[in-house]
Image (tube, rainbow, N blue to C red):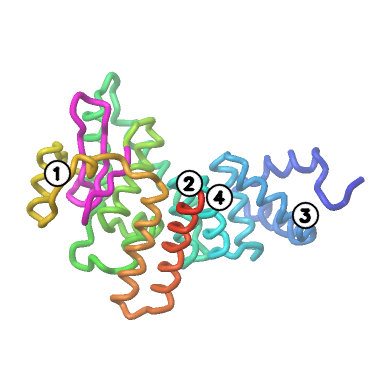
Amino acid sequence: MDHDQPSLESSEALLGLLDDPSPAVRKVLLAHFAAQGPAARNFLEALVKRGDRLLGVHARGYLEELKFTDPVAEFVGFIRSLNYELETGALLLSRTVFPNLDAGACCEQLDALAARCRELFAEPLSIREKCRILNRVLFHEHGFRGNIEHYTDPLNNFIDQTLARRKGTPLSLSIVYLLVAQRLGMDLEPVGLPGHFMVGCYLEDAPLFIDAFEQGAFRSPEEVFAFLKANKVSPKVSDLAPTPVREVLCRTCRNLAHHYSLAGDATHAKLFTGFVEEFEETHERHASP
């Protein structure tokens, strides 16, 4: 038998135990993985890349606890992979500063918010009606809000911190909104406006924009243009287009570089500036003919 990899039977058994909440089971699995060393690391990393979100979360948790991962290197690898998925990217980004982040707990919080919305859905509902219910759950029942008092606090930008503190920036609150909507099968898009961020819905005759920083206020295209003009920006139709996930995450890194710089934390400002450069260089490298 090849002792470098677990047998198929062993692998299938392990898959069934990864999400077991029992401390005793977790202790046994940690000992098993630690004993296997590189083979266990390869096994767990393969699960992370497999495409099963929940299984990947649990596998990543074991990698973190066993110190098999370097969060900064992992996020750089994510950037270079070009396989940009918003939830994974947001969690990996947070781990670069909070390496002990419990990704599973974050996913469970998002799941719970979506489950509460489902309780209130009474189909058939229009997408606008579903957004109203999502607004009720996030902003009224759970108290998510824009952190107006300390807007440049770097913590506002991290998905785990936004979930824990229930406050953030237009961008981080929009990410929470999008991830809950995704669980509900709602086809919404990130919209990176100049100087602001919203959520876009393009399923009706005219686009609908949702301002998560303003308690989920609905905005028409005309109102978004008026908002931009009021902030000394000359609006363009292209401003209303969906923003790629790559740019959503890159913009989060730009915000963090700026906010850490304002906070006098040069080390973290440099870290996130480096991520911005990595995003831009990777995009340029693969966009070139």
Badge 2 vs badge 3, beta-carbon distance below 8 Å: no
Residue sitting nearer the eye, 75 or 21: 75
Q: In front: mark 1 or mark 3?
A: 1
Residue marked by disc 2: 84
* Structural distance between the alpha carbons of marks 1 and 4: 34 Å
Q: Is residue 189 left or right of residue 2?
A: left
Amino acid at the residue labelled 2? Tyr
Q: Is residue 193 magenta?
A: yes
Rendered location of residue 21, percent (x, y)? 59, 49
Q: In front: mark 4 or mark 3?
A: 4
Q: Is residue 137 left or right of residue 217?
A: right
Amino acid at the residue labelled 1? Val
* Structural distance between the alpha carbons of marks 4 and 3: 22 Å
* Structural distance between the alpha carbons of marks 2 and 1: 27 Å
The span picked out in magenta is 189-215
What element does badge 1 sit on?
A: helix
* Structural distance between the alpha carbons of marks 1 and 3: 53 Å
Rendered location of residue 151, percent (x, y)? 23, 65
Residue that protrudes farthest toward the right in the picture: 1
What element does badge 4 sit on?
A: helix
Badge 1 vs badge 4, beta-carbon distance below 8 Å: no
Rendered location of residue 198, percent (x, y)? 24, 46
Badge 2 vs badge 4, beta-carbon distance below 8 Å: yes
Amino acid at the residue labelled 3? Ala
Rendered location of residue 180, percent (x, y)? 36, 41
What element does badge 2 sit on?
A: loop
Residue marked by disc 4: 81
The crowd level at tag 3 (other Cα within 10 Å; few <14, some 14-19, many 20+) is: some
Residue marked by disc 1: 224
Amino acid at the residue labelled 4? Ser
Q: Which mark is residue 39?
A: 3
